[in-house]
Image (tube, rainbow, N blue to C red):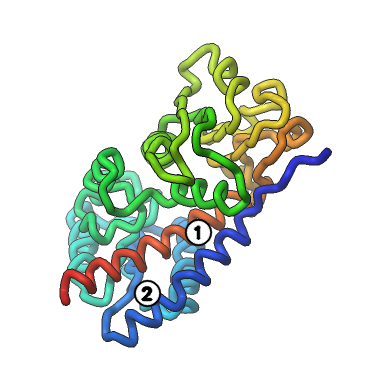
Amino acid sequence: MPAQLLSGRPVADAVFAEIRPRIAALREAGHPVGLGTLLVGSDDASAGYIRMKIDKAEELGMTAPHIHLGDDASQAEVEDAVRALNEDPEVTGVLVQHPTPPQIDFEAAMLRVDPDKDVDGLHPVNMGRLALGMPGMVACTPAGIERLLAHHGIEVSGRDVCILGRGTTLGRPLALLLSQKRPTANAAVTVVHTGVPDWAEHTRRADIVIAAVGVPGIVRPEHVRPGAVVVSGGVRYAGRRLLPDVDESVAEVAGAITPRIGGVGPTTIAMLFKNCVDAAERLAAGGA
C-alpha cells in the first residue's frame, strides 16, 4: 500500500483562506496589516524569495514596505533599517532575509527586531515565550509542521515523535511546540542529532520521524519503522534542485510522508503570513 502523501499546498491554502477575512476586517476597522522586508546584498535566490513574499502580501491585501541595502552595507545601516521597519506604523511584521553579506552580524540584526513584529518567531523573546507556553510568534516551519500533521489527520497526542536535528530554526522550537499540552501536540518528543552515534536507534522506535538537519538523504528506509509517519523539514539546494533530508525511497516503508517538493515549504510561508496577521490583531487590540 503506497504511503499517504502529506502535501503542504492544501494546508497553505487553508491558512490563507483563514487569514484573508481577518485582513479585510482589520483594514475595514482602520488597522494596518503589513509585512516589512529587508534585503541586504545581491543574492539572486534571496531576492527571489523576497519578491515572492511581497507579491503574496499584496495579493492578500497587505502592504509590503521593502528596504534593499547593497552588498557593502554596514552593520549600523542594517540595524537602522530594522529600526525603521519597527517604527513604521504600516508594518505589523518584520522579516530580515537570510543570508546577509559576510560583514553583517545577522544574529545582532535580528536582536533589533521588535519581538512583537518578529514574523520569523526566532527572536530570543519569542523563543522564551514558546518555552514558557506564553502567547507570541512561533517559528514558521515548526508551526507549519504542526498544522500539516493536523490537516492530514495524523494523530500526534500521546505518540512517540523523534526529531533529528536540534537547530534553533526548526528542531529546538519544534520539540517545544509538539510537547505542549494541546490536541495537535502533546507528544512524547525525543531530539537526536548527528552527534549521537546511534541516532537511528531512536528514529526506528518513533511513530513520527521529523528530519531537520539539512543533510540530503540522511534518512533512509532502514532508519524508520514500517508504517511510520515521516516529515522532511530540512533541505539543501544543489543549484536550483531541492534536496530534502529524507531520501525518496523512504516512501516504500513509510505509512505517510511529505513529498520532495510541496511538503513543508508551503506551510512555512503560510505561517509567516499568519504570524503577521496575528501580530496586527494584537497591535490593534493594544491600541484600542
Q: Which mark is residue 217?
A: none
Question: Label 1's element?
Answer: helix
The residue positioned farthest toward the right in the image shown: 1
Report the amino acid beneath label 2: Ala
Q: In x, y percent, where is residue 28?
A: 33, 87
Which residue is identified by label 2?
64
- In this picture, is 156 found above or below 280? above
Q: Is residue 62 left or right of residue 235?
A: left
Viewer can see residue 61? yes
Which quadrant of the figure has residue 64?
A: bottom left
Residue drawn where x is 62% and y is 28% of the image: 218
Which quadrant of the figure has residue 93?
A: bottom left
Residue drawn where x is 50% and y is 32% of the image: 158
- In this picture, is 271 found above or below 258? below
Q: In x, y percent, where is residue 23?
A: 39, 77
- Locate the N terminus and report the quarter of the image it occupies: top right
Viewer can see residue 113? no
Which residue is identified by label 1?
44
Question: Label 2's element?
Answer: loop
Q: Nearer the viewer, mark 2 or mark 1?
A: 2
